């Protein structure tokens, strides 16, 4: 059997077995089947990826079945494998396999483990369907599949009201983006008369300069199509305006956060833009929008990350910011750089999320960093793993030494290529990205210092100390009278170790292939050779800008959280409304609540009370029931049981009938 068939369908089969048969086979068997299916998929994905690295891989399309035949619209369900797909395969299957293994320990006490593992595998299958799509409809199938699975996973603890609200919010916000994506697909079919990605990309350059009617006006064809498609990417990849679901998604179990924010759902938009890059190349105005939105998101999310106290929310806003880097890299035409950052980000962001989960596990599910402190001695393996992840995301590395962690190679490359593009908006993206890198360093080290350095504030926290019920023996042996953090089980620590290797070496090993070799991509993305060469010719101050701001952010965090711990509170009080504005996430939730949510509820109540109950029910079912009831009361009085009464009624009826006939 073709290995790509096993890679794609092994998670689906495992999800069906665990989801439908988990009650009979038990939790252990369900976990073993789903985890084994993902490790099998990952084991088969790496050889495909390495073959493209070695230059021996060949693009292929594996047909599964004929899917739709309807007039001019005919397409198969087929699995496309090229360099771009190969990159996504290793990212998705590797991170998902490690998340499955990690969940053995993290979800060990949950009574619905089989359902959880089934959802994880279903999520992975949907994402694999998206990245192997050979046509836009198949891509949309996977696109909606990850949306459904994310809804199920975010709201996994459905008895928790906040989890249900977060799941609904993610679902609704993504429907807004998906409307744009659907319109983009419809328009693309209208223009090109096909949904085949190969055929569309081949014909796209010839459509540059043509116009199309949309919403009663004439627009540039490729611009309007690409903007509609990008609206879908904004929703799925949480760009500014459609980002509000992302931090709330933290209500789901931590392994879900790692899977959604590292390897799967949030990277779908970046993948889609890179897959359709020849279309975007034919729409320069659309690329400008992508650049501006990406740069704005990068900056906006980084500012919020500096103020949050929930350890998972800090990392979530970090994800939002890093996605902004990927988009403005694609916006300036450096699709290889965007994919390279997607690749490295998957490793260190999954590492940070799973490391945060290990901290939360150690702290008895407490997520507020104000109750942490001094944990590096209590959970040393988790500490080192998160340290490697922090070194990677902050971009620690030295250009002249040719050495650095994963983020150094990919994020610095994006800043260099944005500067090299030399356009008005690309230079703006460079400066916003550089400032965001400073904030990234600050909030990342802030997280580390609050969690692992300083005095152990959890000793004084009544919330943590009283959340654990100890046996008399444990209480008697505990001289401090409190709760002690503990290291996670091996099933959680092994994934941290593997991801640490990726956070350290992924950029060092693969940067040449992603950034310097057009042959590696083999036409799977639009490759701007001139831009990629210009990236290496930027001034040295540009090359060292990210390193410089990283050091500034680190020193600022050391001063504020280790040397002068009172500085953050004093600064927040001094900034006053500015701090509150940033802390409340730029007031987007309040704005949307006022503009969209409240009017929607008002309109719903109006239709409910005035329309449904006041009109339809009143004159429909309730009105008919009233007439029948009153009629039956009158009929009951007529039914006297006397023969003379019935004869009188018959006579009156006969007289009435004769009168009607005569007149």
Image (cartoon, rainbow, N blue to C red):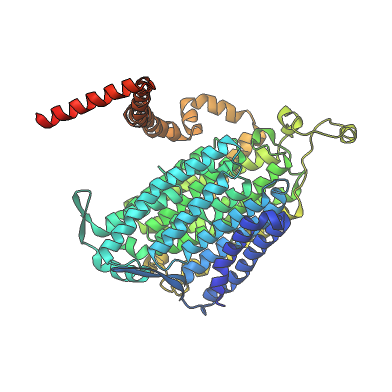
Q: Is residue 54 left or right of residue 38?
A: left
Question: Residue 200 at x, y = what percent?
Answer: 32, 68
Q: Tell which residue pokes out farthest to the bottom in this image.
A: 56
Question: Residue 465 at x, y = what percent?
Answer: 76, 31
Q: Is residue 483 left or right of residue 596?
A: right
Q: Is residue 87 above or below residue 240?
A: below
Q: Nearer the viewer, residue 76 or 427?
A: 76
Q: The C terminus appears in which quarter of the rendering?
A: top left
Q: Is residue 64 left or right of residue 228?
A: right
Residue occupying image coordinates x 74% and y 32%: 467
Question: Residue 154 at x, y = what percent?
Answer: 56, 45
Q: Tell which residue pokes out farthest to the left in this image.
A: 663
Q: Nearer the viewer, residue 419 or 458?
A: 458
Residue occupying image coordinates x 35% and y 27%: 628
Q: Nearer the viewer, residue 336 or 585?
A: 585
Task: Examine the image and state in which quarter residue 122 appears.
Answer: bottom right
Residue occupying image coordinates x 71% and y 29%: 463
> Count the marks: how many?
0
Residue 553 in sight: no
């Amino acid at each position: 059997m073709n290995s790509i068939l096993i890679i794609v369908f092994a998670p689906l089969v495992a999800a069906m077995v665990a989801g439908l048969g988990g009650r009979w086979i038990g939790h252990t068997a369900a976990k073993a089947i789903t985890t084994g299916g993902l490790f099998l998929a990952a084991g088969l994905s790496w050889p495909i990826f390495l073959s493209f690295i070695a230059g021996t891989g060949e693009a292929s399309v594996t047909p599964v079945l004929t899917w739709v035949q309807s007039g001019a619209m005919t397409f198969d369900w087929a699995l496309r494998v090229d360099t771009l797909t190969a990159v996504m395969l290793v990212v998705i299957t590797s991170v998902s396999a490690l998340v499955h293994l990690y969940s053995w320990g993290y979800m060990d006490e949950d009574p619905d483990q089989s359902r959880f593992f089934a959802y994880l595998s279903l999520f992975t299958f949907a994402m694999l369907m998206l990245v192997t799509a050979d046509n836009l409809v198949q891509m949309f199938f996977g696109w909606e599949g990850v949306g459904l699975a994310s809804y199920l996973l975010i709201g996994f603890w459905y008895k928790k009201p906040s989890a249900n609200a977060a799941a609904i919010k993610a679902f609704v916000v993504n429907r807004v983006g998906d409307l744009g994506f659907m319109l983009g697909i419809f328009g693309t079919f209208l223009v090109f008369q096909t949904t085949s990605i190969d055929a569309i990309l081949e014909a796209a350059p010839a459509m540059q300069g043509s116009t199309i009617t949309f919403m009663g006006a004439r627009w540039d064809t490729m611009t309007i199509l690409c903007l509609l498609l990008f609206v879908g990417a904004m929703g799925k990849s949480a760009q500014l305006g459609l980002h509000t679901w992302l931090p709330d998604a933290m209500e789901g179990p931590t392994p879900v956060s790692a899977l959604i924010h590292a390897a799967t759902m949030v990277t779908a938009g970046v993948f889609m833009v890179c897959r359709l890059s020849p279309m975007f190349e034919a729409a320069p105005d659309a690329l400008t929008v992508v650049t501006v939105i990406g740069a704005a998101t990068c900056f906006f999310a980084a500012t919020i990350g500096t103020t949050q106290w929930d350890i998972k929310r800090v990392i979530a806003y970090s994800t939002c910011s890093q996605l902004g880097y990927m988009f403005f890299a694609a916006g300036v035409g450096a699709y290889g750089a965007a994919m390279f950052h997607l690749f490295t980000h998957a490793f260190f962001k999954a590492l940070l999320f799973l490391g945060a989960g290990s901290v939360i596990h150690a702290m008895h599910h407490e997520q507020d960093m104000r109750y942490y402190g001094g944990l590096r001695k209590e959970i040393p393996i988790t500490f080192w793993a998160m340290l490697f992840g922090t070194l990677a995301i902050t971009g620690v590395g030295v250009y002249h030494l040719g050495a650095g962690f994963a983020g150094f190679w990919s994020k610095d490359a994006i800043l260099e290529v944005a500067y090299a593009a030399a356009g008005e908006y690309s230079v703006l993206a460079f400066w916003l990205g550089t400032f965001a890198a400073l904030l990234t360093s600050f909030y990342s080290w802030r997280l580390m210092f609050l969690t692992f350095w300083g005095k152990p504030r959890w000793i004084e926290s009544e919330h943590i100390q009283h959340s654990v019920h100890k046996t008399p023996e444990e209480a008697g042996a505990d001289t401090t009278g409190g709760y002690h953090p503990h290291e996670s089980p091996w099933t959680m620590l092994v994934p941290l170790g593997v991801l640490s290797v990726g956070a350290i070496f992924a950029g060092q090993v693969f940067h040449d292939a992603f950034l310097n070799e057009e042959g590696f991509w083999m036409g799977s993305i639009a490759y701007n050779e001139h831009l990629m060469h210009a990236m290496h010719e930027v001034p040295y101050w540009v090359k060292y800008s990210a390193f410089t701001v990283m050091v500034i952010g680190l020193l600022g965090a050391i001063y504020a959280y280790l040397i002068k711990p009172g500085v953050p509170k004093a600064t927040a009080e001094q900034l006053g409304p500015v701090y509150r504005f940033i802390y409340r996430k730029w007031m987007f939730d309040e704005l949307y609540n006022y503009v969209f949510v409240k009017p929607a509820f008002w309109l719903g109540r109006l239709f409910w009370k005035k329309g449904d109950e006041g009109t339809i029910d009143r004159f429909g079912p309730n009105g008919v029931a009233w007439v029948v009831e009153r009629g039956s009361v009158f009929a009951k009085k007529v039914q006297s049981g006397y023969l003379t009464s019935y004869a009188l009624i018959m006579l009156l009826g006969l007289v009435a009938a004769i009168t009607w006939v005569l007149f």
